[in-house]
Amino acid sequence: MNFPSKLIEDAVNEISRLPGIGKKTALRLALHLLKQKESVSESLSQAILKMRTEVKYCTICHNISDADICGICASNKRDRSIICVVEEIPDVLAIENTAQYNGLYHVLGGVISPMHGVGPDELKIASLMKRVEESSENSKVSEVILALPATMEGDTTAFYITRMLAAKGIKVSTIARGIPIGGELEFTDEVTLGRSILTRVNYSPE
Amino acid sequence: MNFPSKLIEDAVNEISRLPGIGKKTALRLALHLLKQKESVSESLSQAILKMRTEVKYCTICHNISDADICGICASNKRDRSIICVVEEIPDVLAIENTAQYNGLYHVLGGVISPMHGVGPDELKIASLMKRVEESSENSKVSEVILALPATMEGDTTAFYITRMLAAKGIKVSTIARGIPIGGELEFTDEVTLGRSILTRVNYSPE
């Protein structure tokens, strides 16, 4: 693509480095910004830079945070006896948006994947164990929920963590797998459907 | 959506103001930037701000430019007797990428649309007339090509410009409308197909 201006070309190149944004979309976004007031581009670039340079990670759960300890870990309204282990930060947001969970979180920062050179030491597994061990008498961790992806890497990670926690007498659970609510049996893949039959639960209409 | 950090929330809000980018995509982009080196966010925000504040518009054709006169208008390799009139800046890029045109351009900055309050005075039509009038003897404008959208607004604008140029004895042409190359008759809308029969051209295989 030939650009009429080096400035546009630079901006398009930078914008198209973002995932899922190609040169054409980047050009569309750049031309959109040119049509808007200067303040729009200003606040956009400032927000990006500020976020990148000033954001912190919670020293307890490794979630994104504005302070050293995140809002969830600092809250006294949360159930401190349950920790939900997730792969990445968006997973915390996804679970929070369900409004069905009131415990704490632990962000691993990935899953064990020998293919990609990710071993247990690259993840925040040691700090999870430390949290469980150091939980004091009046706020003892009694359950760890594994909310990891239903992939081989996710299962490997779940297995690894379960084995480490088993010795400490902590209850380990995993989120239910099965047919999504509203899902049609016909269009569900056979592995999910097969497992949903094997792991069937007692029927209890409320 | 609840955000764990005000910084992320601000960045997501700013990014999602871009056209075609919702909150979820904006969050994905923000988290992607957090995973990259700080320099990535730095160069992105600098490129955006620099583009917005420093970009110029060619005083002749109103295309984006790094200088007062754009590369196309300044070039002595272009045919200065033909001006191609387009609606917006991306149209120039699209035509340039065909490598089939070697004349000059004129960016109107829109099309006549009474519905949206856009009259001829809001567009760069007066400056087009001035360009045609002021073209000197040795580089006289002999043809104006209208490459405007095939909409009612585009047609209205084309009609308006044609009427103004007719008095000056300038040849006015418009880009061909019809079935796209590779297009199937079956799936072409009836207006396009109907007009392509009415405006049929002599068959001349090369």
Image (cartoon, coloured by chain):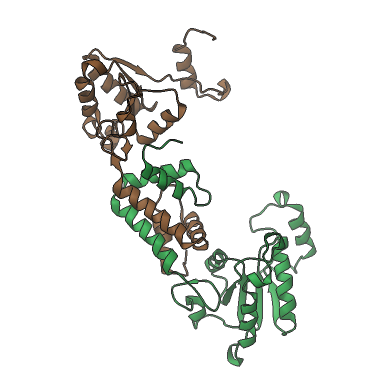
Chain colours: A green, B brown
Q: Please provide percent x and percent y for residue B54.
A: 30, 47
* Front in this rendered view, residue A23 or B187: A23
In the image: residue B16, left or right of residue B132? right
* Front in this rendered view, residue A156 or A90: A156
Reply above or below: A142 against B20: below
Quarter location, residue B10? bottom left
In the image: residue A197, left or right of residue A93? right
Mark yes or no: residue A33 visible.
yes
Q: Please provide percent x and percent y for residue B64.
A: 32, 38
- State the residue at coordinates (38%, 51%): B47
Q: Quadrant of the C terminus of chain B?
A: top right
- State the residue at coordinates (57%, 73%): A101
- Furthest residue to the bottom? A137
Reply above or below: B180 against B71: above
Q: Please provide percent x and percent y for residue B165.
A: 24, 18
Quarter location, residue B137? top left
Quarter location, residue A109? bottom right
In the image: residue B182, left or right of residue A47? right
Reply above or below: A21 against A55: above
- State the residue at coordinates (68%, 52%): A184
